Every structure is written in structure tokens, then in C-alpha cells.
């Protein structure tokens, strides 16, 4: 029981603090053939950005492959010989960035960040010359000025944990009764089957709501994720989602006969797709179209959109009525289907 | 020895008679590799944006054209004020607003300075960063191009020195996200299968009561444990091999390193994971509990194991914690073997650490398993 | 008693936290006896049996089974006993033959011995037709009988049976007891718990457990005399009332 409460808390804390999409203290190596003032300056600028940490100074290009093979370095910056001479006398000098692209995501980010630091430096030295006309771009990051990745993760974590507690646990718990044979006993009793199911499900409903509340509290107070919109709306939508997940769990339990299968379906068919395709970690719009369509049938995907809108953007109901409608519709669908399957079983 | 053989025979018979087991072992990995590898990308390829051009000059139109021509950016709207455009953030119609104010061209020509704004929906911080970078690149390129256009050569303007940056991507020149993701997903799958199945299998025998019948026989602990772990060990290795084959055929994942190295390491790694499953079964009474605990532990290990998010992006204390996570060692190693061809020497650390883990976990689980309660 | 004492229990106690399941029981069982361990559900029978089999460790007290100490030599005990649990515990997803082979192997029997045993079981139980059927397709009574035979596949000195005839019809119960008699004739000591009082008549001696203690221990006829009862059921009711 402790686990049912502790788990979401532990996960939120862990993920909020540890899982990042950002770049921080990434280890790099520098191969500086020139070792002059300018390369020093540039290196310092890169290393004091907070994004990178110098792991090694290299001396020749034979070391390149070895460094990468060790697996700790993500980028090697190479300054050509006579860098400052070339720069100031001939007007052009070369820097080469070699990236370990085995993690393409990381490589892309590392390259972009390094590049923008270099561009900054470029601007600084250009400022000393007569200013060519320049376009200044002011960048405004809305809803998340510090680009904290936790903002994006919290809605997803809520969806996952609620889905886990509600759908997974419900389906397993009902299936368990079936496996042990006690379900038949309940059905034979004068209790209305609907009542039996509701009785089974209510504990998980309460649990789900409590979990959601806990996660929200932690996100707001520990991680500083804002709730720009209405708290009431957020709570209401969350309850709706919990009910959706519960009804899905019930549906699963009407289809399978033993716990192991229930677990496998819930995990493989529900959990993994939810983690991957709901927009929790990977943005949906960048996936192949087929998968985008597939993500439409995941309740979690709609919930994540709703939470993001309400929490981060302060959207009111008029912006999310469509998603709410879809969730409600799914719930109804699951419930009707479950009732049908249930009746067939009884006959 | 004989006893172990008998146990193995029983286990294998039971596993393969279980109708949901076979599809699980074969079909699930395929489906997940297919679907999930395609989903797992942080690439920003479709940036929906809205243009608010209050200048409507040749200048501003040129700039707007640059964005239009760039394949990453998709123009979704034209508005006449930022307030209007921001509504599109709420409805998720676009993620970026290009705001070009009045007198954009005039200011540039007369004063050599003009301003514009990029408003980015930064819910997804990482994506926002990239959108910023891409947009800034376009704008700066535009800036440079018009300098030469608008400033006639031969004027007294000095060109500042230029730092020329070029970059090369090693091991994955096309920045194929799949080469990174697929091995990771495979590791996650194999791990889950190994740990869950082992844990639930033993929990099931406990629940049904057959474990009691075994405990009352003279069967030795090590015989029982070997018999229980071995089948899932084999299955785990098999799924790994199978998944790699699919990865190679469908996604062209390179296999630069030696399979021997890979499977030796995988064998050791699997023992740890199965050991965790075994340990979980010694602290639970029912399958439900076993599954829940296994899920809890697995999700944490997997998400913190550097499979979906890079370990390097984590804060220091978290990075140190990943040292204790067998998954992070193995997933790092598998990528090194597949993509860089690393061998025993480079992976000495991983081999050692994983062996120590395997030993400790199994010892712990064996210690906890009691024939007499 | 002139027979070799094959089970000796002295003040055997098992507590689960504050709850005392077995409260200082002492008794002896002779070789070749059919010893009945009676009592209502929850009286402590199963816990007592589990301690003797080495499945549970006692809180206090002493006991020796087949000459071995239950604290220090439980593994040696297990080589010499058979056990049939209250819950059915052969493997439902294996066939009759596979189950027999498995347990034979676990008890270290050689291949040819296992083959012989299999043949013998199938003949005795008249299950030749069913030898390759999965256990889950057989009726309960047959499964119980098979479980019993499997429990003594290695010809142990003692076999512990915990409610072996639960949920089975009277005809099947009689057949089951025929098997039990036969194994007793072959020299196996049978320690059987049951809550069917009529089965007590089949035993050589009987002990009655009430609330974790042994309330009475003697042959069925002597008990009926003592309590002035015409059936074991009456004996039990009278004891429980006190």
C-alpha cells in the first residue's frame, strides 16, 4: 500500500530532477593546434557557458577516434594552426566541430549550442569594427522562459501514473478475482453486477485522484511548474481522465481471463504507447503520420494536451472543449463496450 | 544436475504451452521496435509558424520568403497583431510567431539597425531551443546576405573577420535518430521481459501453491533458482538477437562490433535483471504485488538509464546514481559495440561493473529465498 | 508402543505475532501407523504439519521426524517424507506423465525407476488412456489420487496428507482411502489431517486439535468409549463444547 502512494511521488521527484532534455556539463575535448590568445578566449567562452566541461586536451588527430571510443566525450573542437593570424590577417579562420552522433538528438543540440556560442563571439569581435547593418532579434520564450524540460514532463508523468494506477491496477484486480474464482461467487450473489464493479473501482478512483493531487503539489511547489489556468478546471479534467482510464481497465478485464495477460496487455498495449506516443517525451508532430493518427486513440494524448493548455498556458475551457469532449466520448465508449462484454459472459 | 534438467524441462514445457507467452516473446518486440523507433525522435522537422508582418516591405517579404522556403518551417497563418497570433498558441496551431514591426526596412537603411521578434511556445524547452537556433540561423544568414546587397563594395566599411565553423558527425553522419534509439528500446524490452516474467512466474507458483510442493522436496536452492532463471535467460538472449536482426534488416542499424562481445555482456547483464525479478518474487506474495513492484523499479531504471534521455543531460548527482543502474551501463555498451565497434578492452569497465552487479543481486536473492519460512 | 517412533513432537509451538496457531503440542507416531490429525478449520492442523515437513520453522519446542531434528536437519527430513498439500499442487499445464516424471526426477529417482513407477501409477489408477492429457482436463478426484501417488513416488517412510479428500465425492473418498491403506500395508506411515469426522474411523489413532492444543489422543474406539459417543463426530462435538 505504501508503494501505491510512494511510487508516484518518488517518480515525479526523480524525473523532475534527473531527467532532462537540456544540455548541461556535457564533456568535450579540445584539439588546439594554435594555442594563442584568440583560441584561449574562445575556449574559455565555451567552457564557462555552463553547457560544457573540458574533459581532455588533445594533441593530435590520431587521438580523435580513441577519445570517442571511450564514450565519454560528445564533441571535439578543433582549432586550426595559426588561428589568430589567419583570422586577423587573412580575415578568415577555421574551427571544426566533430560530434559523436551516435546519439543524434544530443549531437544536434550540442552542435547548435556550440555554434551559437561561436556566433556570439563572432558578434563580439565584429562589434569592434564599423557596424554593418544588423537585424537584432528579440526572442521571447512563452510559458517557459527558462526552457525547463520539467514543464513538458509533468503533464506526461501525470498521465502515465494515473493511467498506471487506474487502468493497470483495475484490470489486474478484477482479473485476479476471476482467476481465483471469487468473481463468480460475487456474480451469483444478489448484488447487482454493476455495483460489484463500481465497488472494485472506487478505491482506485480515490487513489488516482490522490496521486494526481500529490503530483500537482510537488510539481508546483518543488519544481515551480505554474498553474496558469483555473485549478478547478484542472481538477475536473483530471477526474475525467481517471474515470477514462478506469473504464479502460474495466474493459481490459472483461476481455482477458488471467492476471498475467492483463498485465501484459496493460503494459505493452497501454503503458508503452502512452509513454512514447502521448507527447510526453517526444513531440508528436515530428512522428510519421501513421503514428500521429495512432496517437489519437490514446486517451493519454488528449489529457496531456489539456493539462499543458491549462497549466502552462492558462487556457480556459473554451480552448479545450474539444479534447474534453473526446475524453468523455472515449469513456462512454469503453463503458458501453464493457457492459456488453460483461453481459455476454453472464449469458 | 539431473534435477536441474528436470526442472528445465518442466519450465520450458510450461512456458511454451502458455498461449500468451509465444506471441509476447515474438510479436511484441517486433511491434514495439517498429512503432516506437519511429516515434522516438526529438528532431524538429515541422515547425508551424505564424507571420505577423507589419512592415510589408520588399525587405520583410524577402525575409518571410526565406522562412517559407525552408523545409523545416510551415506557414500556418498570417495575422495583424501579436495578440491575435498568440491565440494560436492556445489552440496549438503554431509554435512560432515571426513578428516584423513597422519601419523594419526604413530603420535598417537609415540607422543600420532594425528589430524583430521571435515568439516561441516554449512548453517543450528543448524544442524551443532548437526552433530558436534554426530561426536565428535563417535571420543571420539573411542579415549577411543583405549586407553585401545593400552596402556597395568599395565603401569604407570594414568587413569583420569571419570565424568559419564547419562540423562533422561521426558514427552517424546522417543523424539518424533510429540508430541511437533502436538499441536502447531493445534493451528496455529485453529487460522488461526478463525481469517481469521471472518475477511473475515465481509469484504465480507461490500464489497457486505449487511452490510449497517443491519446497518440501529435497531440491536444493541453487537447483531451483537455476531452473527458474535459465529459461528466461535463454529467452531474453533470444529476443535480443531477434530484435537486433529486425533492427538490422528494417532500419539498417550497423553492427560494427563483434557479436561475441555483445552477447557475452548481454548474458551477464541479463543475469542481473533476472536476479532482480527473483528478488522481487521473494518479497511478494501475489502476482499483482510482484508486477507492481517490478514496474516501479523498471520504469525508474529504464528512464534513468539513458535510453530516452541522455545521461549527460542529467544533473551531477543523478549521473553518479546512474552508475548503480545496470541498464545505463548496458545500454551505453550496446551502443558502443554496435555503432563504434568497441571491444572487450574498451568495455572493461562495463564488464566489471555488470559482473559485480550480477553477483551481488543473485547472492541477495538466493539469500532471501527460503525453503523453510 | 512397540513400534519404532517415527515422529516425536515435544511442546511444539508456533506463534504468528500475537496469535498462537499451535500451542505446545506433544505426541508420538509409530512406524506404519495411520495417524489422524483431526480438528476444525483453523485449529492449527496445517501449521502443525508444515512444521513437521520443514516448511515452517517452529517458535519453540522440539520435534524429530524419521529420526532427524526439524530445526537442524530439515533437508534430510525432506528426503524421507512425502507431502500432499491442502491446495492442489501438481502442475495443471503438464500432462499426467510429465508430472510423474518431474517429481520422480526431483526426488532423484533413476530413469528406469521413474518409468516403472509411471507404469505402475497409470495401472493402479486406471489412467492409461489419460497419460498424455493435461492435468487441468481431469476431474478433481483423479487429480487428488495422482497427487497422492506422486507424493510417495520415492517410497518415503512417512507421507503427510493435509485434507487430501477435500471437495471430493464419498465414492472417491473411499477409493482414496483404499490407496492410503495399501501404502500403509507397504510400510509407509501415514499422517493425515482432515475435518471429515467419519474418516477418523479409518485411522489407527486419532488426535483432536482445538484452538492449537491437542484435546484428545487415542484410538477411535477408546475415544468413543471415553466420551460416551456413537460416532467420532459426537466425540468431536463433546470435546469442542468443553
Image (tube, coloured by chain):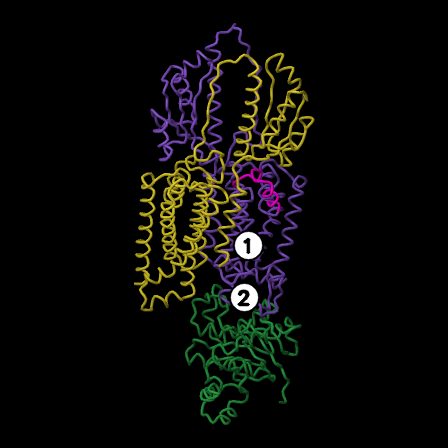
Quadrant of the image containing the C terminus of chain B: bottom right
User: In the image, which lettered chain appears green?
Assistant: C
**Part of the protein shown in magenta:** B308-323
Q: Is residue C206 magenta?
A: no
Q: Is residue C7 visible?
A: no
Main secondary structure type of the part rendered in magenta: helix
Q: CA distance from mark 2 to mark 1?
A: 18 Å
Residue B232 badge:
1
Q: Which residue is mark 2?
A: B211
Binning the other alpha carbons within 10 Å of mark 1 as few (below 14), some (14 to 19) or many (20 upward) gives many
Residue B281 % position (x, y):
54, 59
The residue located at (35%, 32%) in the rendering is B87
Q: Colour of chain A?
A: yellow
Q: Is residue A207 above or below residue B61?
A: below
Q: Chain of mark 1?
A: B
Q: In the picture, residue B172 is in which quadrant?
A: top right
Q: Residue furthest top?
A: B154
Q: How far across and how far down the image is residue A135, in percent?
A: 47, 18
How many residues crowd mark 2 within 10 Å: few (<14), some (14–19), many (20+)? Answer: some
Chain letter of the residue beneath label 2 in the structure image: B
Residue B124 shows in this picture: yes
Q: Is residue B322 magenta?
A: yes
Q: Relative to B158, does residue C83 appear above or below in the rendering?
A: below
Vertical placement of B147 versus B14: above or below?
A: above
Are marks 2 and 1 in one subunit?
yes
- The chain assigned the colour purple in the figure is B
Measuring from the top left, give residue B43's x and y in whole percent: 47, 33
Q: Are marks 2 and 1 in contact (CB under 8 Å)?
A: no
Amino acid at each position: 500500500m505504501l508503494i501505491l502512494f510512494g511510487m508516484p511521488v518518488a517518480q515525479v521527484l526523480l524525473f523532475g530532477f534527473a531527467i532532462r532534455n537540456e544540455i548541461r556539463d556535457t564533456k568535450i575535448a579540445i584539439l588546439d593546434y594554435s594555442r594563442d590568445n584568440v583560441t584561449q578566449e574562445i575556449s574559455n567562452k565555451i567552457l564557462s557557458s555552463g553547457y560544457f566541461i573540458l574533459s581532455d586536451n588533445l594533441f593530435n588527430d590520431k587521438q580523435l577516434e580513441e577519445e570517442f571510443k571511450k564514450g565519454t566525450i560528445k564533441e571535439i573542437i578543433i582549432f586550426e594552426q595559426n588561428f589568430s593570424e589567419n583570422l586577423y590577417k587573412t580575415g578568415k579562420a577555421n574551427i571544426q566541430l566533430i560530434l559523436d552522433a551516435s546519439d543524434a538528438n544530443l549531437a544536434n543540440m550540442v552542435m547548435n549550442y556550440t555554434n551559437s556560442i561561436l556566433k556570439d563571439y563572432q558578434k563580439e569581435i565584429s562589434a569592434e569594427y564599423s557596424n554593418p547593418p544588423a537585424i537584432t532579434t528579440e526572442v521571447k520564450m512563452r510559458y517557459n522562459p527558462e526552457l525547463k524540460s520539467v514543464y513538458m514532463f509533468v503533464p506526461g508523468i501525470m498521465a502515465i501514473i494515473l493511467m498506471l494506477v487506474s487502468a493497470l491496477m483495475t484490470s489486474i484486480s478484477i482479473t485476479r478475482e476471476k482467476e481465483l474464482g471469487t468473481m463468480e461467487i460475487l456474480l451469483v450473489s444478489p448484488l447487482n453486477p454493476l455495483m460489484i464493479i463500481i465497488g472494485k473501482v472506487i478505491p482506485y478512483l480515490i487513489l488516482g485522484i490522490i496521486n494526481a493531487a500529490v503530483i500537482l503539489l510537488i510539481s508546483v511547489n518543488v519544481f515551480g511548474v505554474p498553474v496558469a489556468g483555473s485549478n478547478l478546471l484542472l481538477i475536473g479534467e483530471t477526474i475525467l481522465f481517471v474515470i477514462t482510464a478506469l473504464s479502460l481497465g474495466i474493459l481490459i478485464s472483461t476481455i482477458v481471463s488471467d492476471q498475467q495477460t492483463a498485465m501484459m496487455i496493460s503494459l505493452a498495449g497501454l503503458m508503452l504507447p502512452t509513454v512514447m506516443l502521448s507527447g510526453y517525451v517526444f513531440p508528436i508532430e515530428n512522428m510519421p503520420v501513421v503514428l500521429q493518427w495512432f496517437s489519437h486513440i490514446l486517451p493519454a494524448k488528449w489529457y496531456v494536451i489539456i493539462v499543458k493548455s491549462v497549466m502552462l498556458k492558462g487556457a480556459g475551457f473554451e480552448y479545450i472543449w474539444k479534447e474534453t469532449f473526446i475524453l468523455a466520448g472515449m469513456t462512454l465508449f469503453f463503458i458501453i463496450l464493457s457492459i456488453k462484454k460483461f453481459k455476454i459472459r453472464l449469458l | 544436475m539431473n534435477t536441474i534438467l528436470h526442472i528445465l524441462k518442466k519450465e520450458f514445457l510450461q512456458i511454451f504451452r502458455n498461449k500468451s507467452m509465444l506471441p509476447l516473446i515474438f510479436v511484441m518486440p517486433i511491434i514495439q521496435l517498429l512503432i516506437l523507433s519511429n516515434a522516438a525522435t526529438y528532431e524538429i522537422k515541422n515547425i508551424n509558424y505564424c507571420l505577423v508582418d507589419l512592415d510589408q516591405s520588399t525587405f520583410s517579404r524577402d525575409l518571410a520568403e526565406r522562412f517559407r522556403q525552408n523545409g523545416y518551417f510551415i506557414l500556418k497563418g498570417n495575422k495583424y497583431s501579436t495578440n491575435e497570433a498568440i491565440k494560436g498558441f492556445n489552440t496549438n496551431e503554431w509554435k512560432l510567431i515571426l513578428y516584423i514591426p513597422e519601419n523594419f526596412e526604413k530603420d535598417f537603411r537609415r540607422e543600420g539597425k532594425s528589430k524583430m521578434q521571435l515568439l516561441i511556445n516554449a512548453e517543450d524547452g528543448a524544442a524551443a531551443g532548437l526552433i530558436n537556433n534554426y530561426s536565428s540561423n535563417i535571420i543571420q544568414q539573411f542579415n549577411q546576405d543583405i549586407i553585401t546587397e545593400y552596402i556597395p563594395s568599395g565603401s569604407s566599411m570594414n568587413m569583420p573577420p569571419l570565424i568559419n565553423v564547419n562540423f562533422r558527425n561521426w558514427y552517424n553522419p546522417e543523424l539518424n535518430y533510429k540508430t541511437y534509439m533502436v538499441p536502447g528500446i531493445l534493451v528496455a524490452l529485453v529487460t522488461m521481459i526478463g525481469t517481469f516474467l521471472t518475477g511473475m512466474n515465481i509469484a504465480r507458483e507461490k500464489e497457486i501453491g505449487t511452490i510449497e510442493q517443491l519446497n518440501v522436496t529435497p531440491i536444493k536452492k541453487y537447483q531451483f533458482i537455476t531452473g527458474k532463471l535459465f529459461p528466461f535467460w535463454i529467452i531474453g538472449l533470444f529476443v535480443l538477437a531477434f530484435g537486433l536482426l529486425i533492427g538490422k534488416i528494417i532500419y539498417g542499424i550497423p553492427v560494427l562490433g563483434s557479436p561475441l562481445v555483445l552477447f557475452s555482456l548481454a548474458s551477464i547483464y541479463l543475469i542481473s535483471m533476472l536476479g532482480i525479478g527473483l528478488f522481487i518474487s521473494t518479497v511478494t506474495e501475489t502476482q499483482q504485488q510482484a508486477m507492481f513492484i517490478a514496474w516501479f523499479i523498471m520504469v525508474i531504471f529504464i528512464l534513468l538509464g539513458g535510453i530516452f534521455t541522455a545521461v549527460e543531460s542529467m544533473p551531477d548527482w543523478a549521473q553518479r546514481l546512474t552508475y548503480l543502474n545496470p541498464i545505463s551501463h548496458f545500454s551505453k555498451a550496446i551502443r558502443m559495440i554496435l555503432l563504434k565497434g568497441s571491444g572487450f578492452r574498451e568495455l572493461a569497465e562495463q564488464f566489471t561493473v555488470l559482473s559485480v552487479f550480477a553477483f551481488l543481486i543473485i547472492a541477495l536473492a538466493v539469500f532471501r529465498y527460503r525453503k523453510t519460512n | 508402543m512397540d513400534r519404532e517412533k517415527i515422529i516425536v513432537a515435544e511442546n511444539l509451538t508456533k506463534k504468528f505475532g500475537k496469535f498462537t496457531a499451535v500451542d505446545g503440542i506433544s505426541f508420538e507416531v509409530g512406524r506404519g501407523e495411520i495417524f489422524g490429525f483431526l480438528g476444525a478449520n483453523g485449529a492449527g492442523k496445517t501449521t502443525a504439519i508444515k512444521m513437521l515437513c520443514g516448511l515452517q520453522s517452529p517458535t519453540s519446542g522440539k520435534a524429530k521426524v524419521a529420526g532427524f531434528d526439524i530445526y537442524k536437519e530439515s533437508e534430510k527430513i525432506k528426503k524421507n517424507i512425502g507431502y500432499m498439500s491442502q491446495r492442489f499442487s501438481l502442475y495443471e499445464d503438464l500432462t499426467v506423465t510429465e508430472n510423474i516424471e518431474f517429481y520422480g526426477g526431483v526426488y532423484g529417482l533413476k530413469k528406469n525407476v521413474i518409468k516403472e513407477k509411471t507404469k505402475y501409477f497409470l495401472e493402479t489408477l486406471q489412467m492409461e488412456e489419460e497419460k498424455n492429457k493435461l492435468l487441468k482436463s481431469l476431474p478433481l478426484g483423479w487429480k487428488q489420487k495422482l497427487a497422492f501417488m506422486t507424493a510417495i513416488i520415492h517410497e518415503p517412510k512417512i507421507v503427510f496428507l493435509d485434507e487430501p479428500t477435500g471437495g471430493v465425492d464419498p465414492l472417491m473418498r473411499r477409493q482414496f482411502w483404499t490407496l492410503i491403506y495399501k501404502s500403509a500395508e507397504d510400510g509407509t506411515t501415514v499422517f493425515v489431517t482432515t475435518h471429515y469426522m467419519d474418516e477418523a474411523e479409518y485411522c489407527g489413532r486419532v488426535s483432536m486439535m482445538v484452538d492449537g492444543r491437542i484435546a484428545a489422543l487415542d484410538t477411535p474406539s477408546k475415544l468413543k468409549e471415553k466420551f460416551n459417543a456413537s460416532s467420532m463426530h459426537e466425540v468431536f462435538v463433546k470435546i469442542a463444547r468443553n
